[in-house]
Image: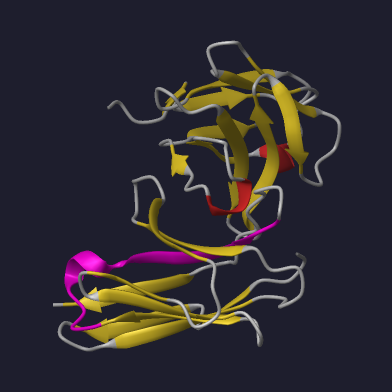
Amino acid sequence: KAGVTQTPRYLIKTRGQQVTLSCSPISGHRSVSWYQQTPGQGLQFLFEYFSETQRNKGNFPGRFSGRQFSNSRSEMNVSTLELGDSALYLCASSLGGTHSTDTQYFGPGTRLTVL
Amino acid sequence: ILNVEQSPQSLHVQEGDSTNFTCSFPSSNFYALHWYRWETAKSPEALFVMTLNGDEKKKGRISATLNTKEGYSYLYIKGSQPEDSATYLCAPSSNTGKLIFGQGTTLQVKP
């Protein structure tokens, strides 16, 4: 089975621009979660989508948004980029059934640099 | 779940040493605890999901225990090898499946 894939792997943007990141989950997985990893903050939860609906949300400003399509692929959008948005963005997929015990499988991440 | 703490922050050991790390989390509203291993330039890899107080899990030379009443979990590595060098992350999950990750323990095993 193919793993979780993320595109693009690297991205350079300037302040004020917007960016869209894509995540394709493992086949059969219906839940996709997004995380931001920065050196000082560790892995922080952004949001989770299940069956095209946002099921969980972290403490990030409204500039961070996402969506999920009927094939479970997910996109994450960040508008009006700030320097502090420079980070590694990881997505993870899971079956999405039992919530707390579901194993999440991570993609390789997208490294976003904001200049 | 607000506060997940892992200690030590980093650890340097010699090949063949056994080692252990701690993950502390709030014991109220506990549902499950996940352990992940994250090697440089790779994706985080799931090690264990633990739910029951007193649970013990094992995968090769790596094992973990769980104490939900006092809110901690230990991860043990027996006979560390250079390929064990990685950051080890723990993450309690809420009832809705949201994972809250600790900062991790970075292990460096010297040959």
Q: Residue at x 54, y 67 (%)?
A: B51
User: In the rendered image of this protein, does residue A49 appear above or below residue B99?
Assistant: above
**What is the residue that sits farthest to the top in this orientation?**
A70
Q: Position of residue B93 (x, y in %)?
A: 64, 58
Examine the rendered structure and indicate whether residue A18 appears above or below residue B72. above
In the image, is B39 to the left or to the right of A19?
left
Quadrant assignment, res A73: top right
> Which residue is rendered at x = 27% and y = 85% of the image?
B13
On the image, the x and y values in percent for residue B65 come to 44, 80
Q: Is residue B86 magenta?
A: yes
Q: Residue B85 lies in magenta, yes or no?
A: yes
User: Is residue A52 placed above or below A114 in the rendered structure?
Assistant: above
Q: In what quadrant of the picture does the C terminus of chain A appear? A: top right
As drawn, A105 above or below A43: above
Q: Quarter-wise, where is residue B15 in the image?
A: bottom left
Asked if residue B104 can be seen in this view, the reply is yes
Give residue A17's position: percent from left, percent from top: 74, 18
**Residue at horizontal 72 percent and vertical 76 percent from the top:** B26
Q: Quadrant of the N terminus of chain A?
A: top left
Q: Residue furthest right?
A: A62
Nearest the viewer among B34 and A114 is B34
Residue A66 visible (yes or no): no
Give the extent of the magenta segment: B78-94
